[in-house]
């Protein structure tokens, strides 16, 4: 017996709708080149790797930064500027440079066509722990609601962040499907919040924890997601 279509489909962003690792690597190179030109004492004292290591140490001592990785990067730069004797007033300019590059993502080929197809049937939302800016990226018009951990104050897998997105869309938790690439943060988190959850497994990984997490479906693209929705629902 088929079920009625969900009223909403919610998406994770990084590594679900676009690959993020190469973008961050490039953004850090662009930021470092900016530092070399505009804050040379920082670039003389630090490499990309030592700046990253300092951020990890800061995160270990202040885990609240997990909610806002942009704030973590800003705090790391302020500390580096102070250590190097550079003007910390330049940090905001550095962050503008970084965020511009961080949002220069290239969605997977199936994303925009898939979102356009889905918009005819469901409300579309996003829930992210990252700091992608859908407006800058050019995808905001496809989303009816977006919830980000750094603005909401709680991060996935906390059930409240998934539930807040459902509330923003005006749907019950059971009427929403969440799609993400991380089995624990996305799939288990959404299921515990009362949503169904689809594992977006673009790279063909095996589920290493089938005893802990069983997705409602596993797909490799939005095309497969839509095929599953059609098969499962009237």
Image (cartoon, rainbow, N blue to C red):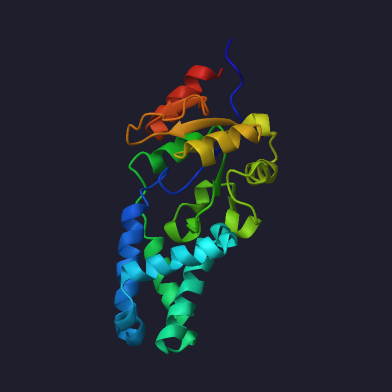
**Residue 140 against residue 203 in the figure, above or below:** below
* Location of the C terminus (image quadrant): top right
Give the image location of residue 209, x and y in percent: 46, 29
Q: Is residue 191 visible?
A: yes
Considering depth in this image, is 218 or 184 the residue closer to the camera?
Answer: 184
**Residue 69 against residue 223 in the figure, above or below:** below
Q: Is residue 8 visible?
A: no
Residue in view at x 53 percent, y 28 percent: 212
Give the image location of residue 175, x and y in percent: 65, 30
Give the image location of residue 46, x and y in percent: 33, 77
Residue in view at x 46 percent, y 32 percent: 199
Residue in view at x 57 percent, y 64 percent: 62
Q: Residue 196 vs residue 210: left or right?
A: right
Give the image location of residue 106, x and y in percent: 34, 52
Q: Quadrant of residue 35?
A: bottom left
**Residue 160 against residue 26 in the figure, above or below:** above
Q: Residue 200 vs residue 30: left or right?
A: right
Considering depth in this image, is 99 or 125 the residue closer to the camera?
Answer: 99
């Amino acid at each position: 017996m088929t079920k009625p279509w969900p009223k909403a489909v919610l998406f994770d962003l990084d590594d679900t709708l676009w690959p993020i690792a190469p973008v961050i690597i490039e953004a850090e190179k662009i930021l470092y080149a900016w530092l070399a030109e505009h804050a040379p004492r920082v670039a003389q004292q630090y490499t990309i790797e030592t700046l990253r290591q300092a951020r990890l140490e800061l995160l270990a001592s202040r885990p609240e930064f997990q909610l806002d990785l942009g704030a973590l990067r800003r705090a790391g730069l302020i500390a580096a500027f102070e250590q190097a004797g550079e003007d910390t007033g330049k940090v905001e300019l550095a962050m503008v440079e970084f965020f511009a590059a961080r949002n220069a993502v290239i969605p997977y080929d199936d994303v925009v066509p898939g979102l356009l197809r889905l918009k005819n049937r469901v409300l579309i939302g996003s829930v992210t722990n990252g700091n992608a800016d859908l407006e800058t990226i050019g995808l905001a018009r496809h989303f009816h609601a977006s919830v980000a951990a750094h603005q909401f104050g709680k991060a996935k897998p906390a059930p409240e962040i998934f539930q807040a997105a459902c509330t923003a869309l005006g749907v019950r938790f059971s009427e929403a499907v969440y799609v993400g690439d991380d089995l624990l943060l996305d799939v288990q988190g959404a299921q515990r919040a009362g949503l169904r959850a689809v594992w977006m497994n673009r790279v063909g990984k095996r589920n290493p924890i089938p005893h802990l997490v069983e997705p409602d479906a596993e797909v490799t693209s939005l095309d497969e997601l839509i095929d599953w929705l059609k098969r499962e629902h009237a």
